[in-house]
Image (cartoon, coloured by chain):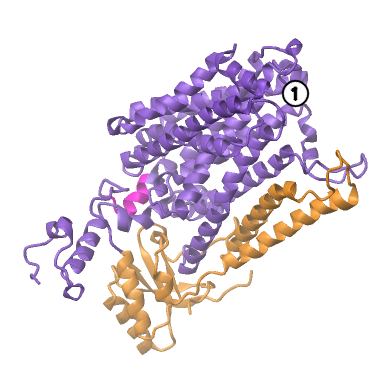
């Protein structure tokens, strides 16, 4: 296979296979660092606040939230869509980039998939709590019940959502775990104590890594990637249909599915950037999550950010073009009404701030990337808030116009889900291989500075000095590698 | 699980994936049967060198996926069209378009679960399994070739020589293994 000598390296620092193992396994086997304990403690506090507010909601009821008869759902659904959206980057990196044979995915896919799973857990908490009686949550499934042979409404996008989110969660979990199995095997064989060895052997399911195991492993990853790719697109499409199939002005829009999917990828990559810029420096993984990885993700953020911007513009144009008074008013109110500030926060964070990623200097500056990624997170949270609250709070009858203000309990639950997310992520960083060890090793032959150089030299010389092909040298690169003792053709 | 007898094996260890590929070719060319190869990561092309057939997991995925499709469609048709048809504004009792999202989701769900559990089953992967590790470095940076020893000392010597010639990074060793893994053809 021809490797371009100018292609960026994905693994730097002259790593050998065993160095990759030690770099990733040692933090798991060593005691936690002070920074980890501090971060984990902080996340646990947020989690505790969330648990308090969730328990309060369960005892007092939804009345403890700021909802009213006009704004019937607000913070809960905003946070639900926010978290589901964040989940999308993980599956995009692991599935879609696998199908496109993007080798840079190997450095970040494990952490991004973990992020997906934790984000979907956070998302699922909100509809659960909004049910008011979460102990009856099983009613959302089509079960024969004692009220007579009634079934759930299969025509409703909310019922589709139940299937979509639960499928998405389980398939992502299977995908993530099947990739983790070989790496747990690696951790097991490095473990120093019997207890740790047994725990990781259990987690690795007794993996040995025989040739047949790997053939099946590759087949499994490919097919799982194949089915996850349409799945990830379907999930946010269905989430958008929760809104789009209603007849509320501002929601009743055919562009919602692609608009939401682009937004989900955008917000997901925003969150991946936030986490990865921190993880790579704190855990000293700069050789695996290189500047090149960060830049690639920044480029995805620019592209999807502009898609989102296009959708904002299209919505306004269609509202004007429809000639419908209600539609036009909703959009006028969205930008210039009492919640106009949230609209402009959204536009500046989502459309304007990612444009800075056009500049290479900014993409390569980790502090700026981190700050912009935080803006993306904020912007995408506000996007959902804007879509939901501004479309609802002034409905068709002016006498029922109401403002919505979230209560302390609602803020607490949101901070609590941040706590759930980061607690889980900190545990993952400490006890799980953060980088897919086997997958990184499998691309080292083509993409690392230890193994690739000889490979390139050989293949290019072969090409350059092959008289059968009828050409002498291919480009400057081949001549550059020509060693003096090499016989001239 | 049935007890497998301990058998003598000859183990060759390599430190490079490309060396391993050439070695496997060399050993098979000598007419020696390779019992199994253990590597820390998937090596493309190794399955061809060893003569392993492509995995049939994609077929499994298709069958399970189809099961999901049929389950979803028949469940919803039973509920909506036969068991309790609800007349909402005269809409049809068999609304196929609005069944499609759930049909799709269940297809993916069944496909993924069926395939992963088949994968675990055929690879003998489960939390309680105590695997037989030939060399602990096989999950790190060493590539292990295992050949079953014969009764015949001369033939064993031939295997030793073949392994040495093929570039093992340390002298081939004899090891008693309760090997019950699948034979590579």
**A304 or B72: which is nearer to us?**
A304
Q: Is residue A21 located in the magenta-colored stretch of the structure?
A: yes
Whether residue A419 appears in this view of the structure is no
Query: Is residue A379 visible to us here?
Result: yes
Residue at 53% from the left image edge and 49% from the top image edge: A176
Corner quadrant of residue B120 = bottom right
Percent x, y of residue A399: 76, 10
State the quadrant of the C terminus of chain A. bottom left
Q: Local crowd at mark 1 within 10 Å, few (<14), some, or many (≥20)?
A: some
The answer to which of A318 and A173 lies nearer the viewer is A318
What's the magenta bit mostly, secondary-structure-wise? helix
Q: Which x, y percent locates residue A56?
A: 71, 19
Q: Does residue A218 appear to the left or right of B125 in the view shown?
A: left
Residue A61: x %, y % from top left: 77, 20
The stretch drawn in magenta includes residue A274: no
Q: Which chain is in purple here?
A: A
Q: Is residue A384 left or right of residue A96?
A: right
Residue carrying label 1: A58
Total numbered labels placed on residues in the image: 1
* Depth check, front residue: A312 or A371: A312
Q: Is residue A284 left or right of residue A225?
A: left
Q: Does B148 sit above or below residue A301?
A: below
> Could you tell me which residue is drawn at 43 percent across and 71 percent down?
B47
Q: Compared with residue A240, is residue A381 higher up or lower down, i.e. above or below?
A: above
Report which colour depicts chain B.
Answer: orange
């Amino acid at each position: 296979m021809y490797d371009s000598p100018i292609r960026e390296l994905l693994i730097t620092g002259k790593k050998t296979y065993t160095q990759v193992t030690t770099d990733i396994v040692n933090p798991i086997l060593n005691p936690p660092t002070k920074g980890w304990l501090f971060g984990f403690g902080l996340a646990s506090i947020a989690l505790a606040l969330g648990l308090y507010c969730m328990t309060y909601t369960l005892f007092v009821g939804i009345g403890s939230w700021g909802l009213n008869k006009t704004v019937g759902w607000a913070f809960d659904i905003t946070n639900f869509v926010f978290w589901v959206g964040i989940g999308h980057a993980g599956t995009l990196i692991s599935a879609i980039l696998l199908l496109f044979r993007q080798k840079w995915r190997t450095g970040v896919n494990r952490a991004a998939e973990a992020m997906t799973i934790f984000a979907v857990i956070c998302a699922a908490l909100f509809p659960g709590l909004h049910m008011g009686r979460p102990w009856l949550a099983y009613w959302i499934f089509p079960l024969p019940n004692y009220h007579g042979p009634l079934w759930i409404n299969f025509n409703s996008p909310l019922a589709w959502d139940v299937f979509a989110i639960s499928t998405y969660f389980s398939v992502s979990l299977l995908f993530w775990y099947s990739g983790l199995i070989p790496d747990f095997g690696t951790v097991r064989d490095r473990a120093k104590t019997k207890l740790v060895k047994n725990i990781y052997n259990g987690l690795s399911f007794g993996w040995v890594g025989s040739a047949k195991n790997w053939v099946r492993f590759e087949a499994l990853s490919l097919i799982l990637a194949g089915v996850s790719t349409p799945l990830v697109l379907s999930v946010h499409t269905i989430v958008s249909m929760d809104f789009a199939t209603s007849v509320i002005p501002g929601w009743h829009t055919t562009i919602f599915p692609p608009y939401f999917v682009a937004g989900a990828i955008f917000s997901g990559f925003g969150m991946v950037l936030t986490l990865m810029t921190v993880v790579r420096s704190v855990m000293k993984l700069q050789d695996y999550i290189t500047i090149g990885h960060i830049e690639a993700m920044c480029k995805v953020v620019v592209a999807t950010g502009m898609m989102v911007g296009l959708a904002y513009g299209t919505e306004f144009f269609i509202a004007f073009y429809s000639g419908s008074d209600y539609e036009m008013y909703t959009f006028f109110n969205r930008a210039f009404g009492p919640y106009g500030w949230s609209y402009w926060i959204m536009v500046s964070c989502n459309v304007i701030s990612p444009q800075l990623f056009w500049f290479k200097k900014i993409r390569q500056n980790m502090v700026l990337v981190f700050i912009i990624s935080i803006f993306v997170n904020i912007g995408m949270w506000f996007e959902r808030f804007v879509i939901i609250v501004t479309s609802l709070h002034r409905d068709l009858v002016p006498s029922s116009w109401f403002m919505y203000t979230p209560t302390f309990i609602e803020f607490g639950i949101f901070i609590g889900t941040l706590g759930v997310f980061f607690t889980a992520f900190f545990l993952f960083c400490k006890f799980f291989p953060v980088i897919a060890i086997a997958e990184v090793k499998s691309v080292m032959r083509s993409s690392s500075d230890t193994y690739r150089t000889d490979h390139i030299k050989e293949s290019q010389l072969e090409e350059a000095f092959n008289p059968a092909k009828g050409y002498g040298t291919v480009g400057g690169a081949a001549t550059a590698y020509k060693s003096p003792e090499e016989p001239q053709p | 699980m049935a007890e497998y007898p301990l058998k003598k094996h000859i183990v060759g260890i390599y430190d490079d994936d490309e060396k391993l590929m050439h070695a496997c070719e060399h050993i098979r060319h000598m007419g020696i049967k390779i019992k199994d190869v253990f590597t820390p990561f998937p090596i493309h092309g190794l399955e061809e060198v060893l003569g392993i057939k492509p995995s049939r997991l994609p077929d499994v995925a298709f069958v399970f996926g189809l099961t999901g499709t049929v389950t979803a469609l028949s469940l919803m048709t039973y509920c909506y069209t036969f068991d309790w048809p609800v007349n909402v504004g005269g809409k049809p009792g068999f609304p196929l378009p609005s069944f499609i999202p759930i049909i799709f989701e269940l297809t993916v769900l069944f496909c993924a679960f069926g395939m992963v559990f088949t994968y675990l089953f055929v690879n003998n992967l489960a939390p309680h399994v105590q695997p037989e590790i030939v060399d602990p470095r096989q999950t790190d940076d060493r590539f292990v070739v295992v050949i079953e020893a014969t009764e015949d000392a001369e033939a064993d010597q031939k295997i030793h020589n073949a392994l040495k010639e093929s570039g093992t990074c340390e002298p081939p060793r004899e090891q008693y293994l309760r090997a019950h893994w699948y034979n590579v053809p």
